[in-house]
Image: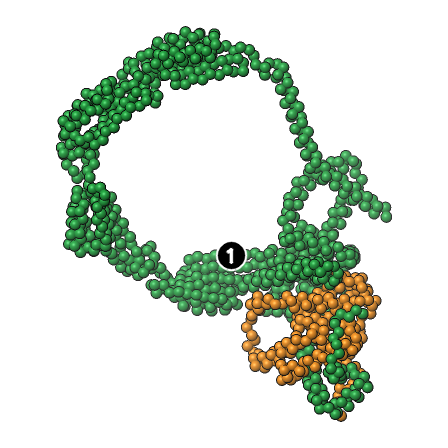
Chain colours: A green, B orange
Amino acid sequence: MKPIFNSTPAPEPLDDLLAAALHGELTAAERAALDARLATDPAARAAYQETQRMHDLLEKNHREAQPDPAFEERMIAAVRRKARAEKEHRETAWESVMVLWRGLGRLVRGRSWPEYAGALVVLLVLGVVAFGPIMAGIRKAKMPEGQARSLAFLSWASPSAAETQLAQTKQKEEYRETGMVIAPPDEPLAASTPPSMITDESKKAEAFADTGAPTGPTASPAQLFQSHAVNLESNEFASHIQYGAPIASTTISTTPSFKTPQSHHSPGPDLAALRPFGLDPNQVTTSPADAAPSEPAHPASTPAATEPSRKLIRNAQLDLEVKSYEQAVDDITVLTKADGGYVDSSSSQRGGNGKLQGTLVAKVLPENLDAFLLRLRGLGEVKNQSISTDDVTRAYYDTEARLDNSRLMEKQLQQLLQRDTGKVADLLQVERELERVRGDIESMQGQLKLYDFQVQYATVTIALAEKDLNQAAAYLLQEHDTFSLFARNVEEAFQQAKAAAGTCQAEILSADLQHNAGQDETAQFVFSVPPAQIDAFLTRVRALGRVENFVRTTRRVANDGGDTGTPADQTRTEKDRVQVEVAIRADDESPRQQTQLAVASTGDIDAQARQAKDDAAVNGAAVTASSFDRAPDGTETAALTFRLPVAHVAALMTALEKLGRVESLTVARRDGPDQPAADDNAPAQIDLQLHNVPAVRFQDEPPRQQTQLAIVSTGDVDAQAQQVKADALQTGVTVTGSSFQRAPDGTEEAALTFRVPLGRAAAFTAMLEKLGRVESLAVQRNDVPGASGTDPDAPAEISLRLHNEAAFVADDRGLWPTLRRTFGGGIAAFLGSVQTIGVIVAYLLPWAAALVLAAWVGRRIYVSRRKR
Amino acid sequence: MTLMSAPSRDEPAPRPADPAREADAATVAAALAGDEAAFEAVIRAYGRRVYAVAYAVVQDAAEAEDIVQETFLKVHQGRTRDAANFTAWLMTVTRNAARDRLRRRRPQASEEVFHALPDDPGARPGAELARREGRERLRRALGALPEDHRTALTLRYLEGLDYRAIEQTMGVSNGALRGMLGRALGTLRRMPALAEERP
């Protein structure tokens, strides 16, 4: 036999002998020698006594750790259970495959080929429609990194496991035929004794009643054990057996004589449905067809019993307004204890107004949650309540399944390590993988424990607040005034405002007087005025000048920072000192009357502008701005601004209007609210714009007359257009646009736009008409109201379209090119359809081939079985 | 000499290994081939020995039971077909599983949080504490021994196997086993921590 444990070098002979003596393993000769030595050697005797003491200590200690008498039975049952749980999903998958196989064979047998072909088409369509989404769904595997698949592969790859499983499948089929049930696996020598047979549900119920099953005080039998099936993947099923109440389950599992009737479940085709419950998880056996799926549940499984198998985390949140915080906390503590829970944590804080608020977290048993919440409502006014239930069933069992899988993976990896072959690097790789898998296992175990804890107790978070928690103790009215003051003399106003502040007991929080670079002076004040004096103060300050932009804001604030919402009746409201911000500026008196005058002159603009300036001097007006501008087109413009008393405006205007034709006149008057309406000395302003009349007006003036002329030329269009342009330039007509184009069919077209003074438009048009045959002529006139209808200087626009007749027919028209184009288009469409059909065939052909192959193989197998 | 006469028993082992617990090669082979009855027989025959080896490593009864289940699950899954070296295989698997457990045991904080239940108020704290402390001291002392020594001790004291059975289980010679047990007891009795310990 290969040594497993490293042997150690020989120790002191005495120790060996003493140990062997105490263990009764000495030969007669050795014993005699030892006895002799002990008789003579006191040190050896002492050593013997010490060793014996150690021997006794070890014996006593290990006696306590010895496994109980039911150890073997427990181990056998547990191993069986684990093995079954692992095998079950594989089995189910295998049976599904077999059923499909047989069904296919039955379907395929004895059909004619047209029927096959029809079925194939239907299957193809169904396959494409149905399997697409399924395949997409499978891709969203729950197992990370394809763990599940690799594990499944490893298990399938183990030949002995597969054989065992096949044997068991057969065994189950036999049982199914005879209506028998598999014996409880933890019954001693179960394999050699006939299986106990319980075939109908009423017998089970009787047997159950007779056993007097020791149920815990808090759990009904149905709650003790639940089995639950989870559909892991489309073809993977796992069964989970879960202990509802740990105390009760311990009682049962450690009582070897305790016998319970077996229950038999049908994981069957619809595993997703909740299965009936068994009494002892060790005895839960599964057999695919020993019970109809519609069979009523086990007597123990009342409808309520379906709930405990779900993993529900219940949480509630309650906002309570109570009279006394302390009293409420005491009451809640009592209520919590009564409902089998405890107060997990609490915190409180006292507000500025002496009211208490705080939060309590209570844990109660989930089944008592609703009653508990009802009782809580009696403690005060419920402001808000929410109950949430988080169903972690799926996550829980997913985690459990992944845990099982990870454990399996771990085992496989360990086995790899044990084989002890291969390179060190490989072994290290396996070690690393093992480490990772173990990390996963630990985190999943932790997650499950956390779930268990959360499921075990419902969490109730109670926010407690005493009544009128946010009521403020007192309020303040805060007033804030801002305005601008325009004064003739800023500095004087500044001093007077200061004086006013002194009289009205106003505090000057800030005062600021600035002399700016120009003549601008500004001053800023911030006053804090007692509420009683505010009106008197404002009256005095406002008298200093013209007030603009007066803004008053009033704010009510709680004295202690509490809620400003609804003041209680008894709350005091005080008026705070008023803050007044004043900005004093110089009142530079903008002109009371503004006149804008535009004059068109035929004379020399520059001279006329000088004349205007002279007129202004006579009338006591000051020229505040003047400009003169001559544009490239000969337009001259002079702009002059005069400032003068209102009384002299009329005289100056009379003088200015004599300069030429008045094009426009605008007078605007602005009277301040507290100024006398007729103040002859108030400032007025006159803006004069003086310009001459150019030969052809600016392009941006809309033409008074528009002429559209189309002429069919018989000569060379291009040459004629050039000629017209040259003529236009000579006669002072502006060409504002021109274009020339030659079409493929030989048509030539020139488009020209001219701008002409209205007086010369008719003559120019007549000249143009000589170019060829007039095809069309349109004249449109736009008269501006108020403008002279016969102004010869007004602009007119003439658009000329000069073109010749088409020279020949283009080569892409006519019968033959059309036929050629039609034929080409047809060919292109045909090739496109060929490509589309090719793609469709490429999609479907592999499926069709696979289905035909499967049907053929199935039929062959079926036929060969029939023959046998 | 009365002192000497007490242990000088000719018949070996205070609790000799149950002959029924020896599984013959045929039973093992049948179990490995998938025979359920034989499989049960194998568990009955080797279960406690596997438990002892596991316990020697992890020093915890519940964990040791888990390891037993794991180990026999592997048998059930047919991880070995070699009936001749079955005992050696079984012990190796057990020992590896136990070592794995030991390595994984370190982060225990989260478990302790959830298992922190109030103590039974009826228990006498003093006596229980002393007993626990004594057990803990012995556990630590055993933990200081080499693993094979601990295994030999456990097979002897927990299972009451005689030397022959232990040799067979551990795959060592009689001399080596004597050396291990002698040295183990010698080390323990010289440990100061156990000097005051009374059985």
> Residue visible at 70% across and 79% down?
B184
Vertical order, B38 against A723 (above or below): below
Q: Count the marks: how many?
A: 1
Q: Position of residue A797 (x, y in %)?
A: 36, 16
> Residue visible at 19% across and 55% down?
A506
| Residue B25 visible, this orientation | yes
Vertical order, A758 against B79 (above or below): above
Does residue A470 appear left or right of residue A539 in this picture? right
Vertical order, A490 against A722 (above or below): below
Q: Nearer the viewer, residue A43 or B24?
A: A43
Q: How many residues crowd around disc 1 within 10 Å: few (fewer than 14), some, or many (20 or more)?
A: few
Tell me where residue A508 sits by quadrant.
Answer: bottom left
Q: Nearer the viewer, residue A420 or B36?
A: A420
Q: Position of residue A542 (x, y in %)?
A: 18, 46
Q: Position of residue A827 (x, y in %)?
A: 66, 23
Vertical order, A849 against A161 (above or below): above
**Residue sitting at the far right:** A868
| Residue B41 visible, this orientation | no
Chain of the residue that carries numbered disc 1 in the rendered image: A
Q: Nearer the viewer, residue A771 or A326?
A: A771
> Residue visible at 72% across and 62% down?
A417
User: Which residue is identified by label 1?
Assistant: A388
Q: Secondary structure at mark 1?
A: strand
In which quadrant of the rendered image does the N terminus of chain A lie?
A: bottom right
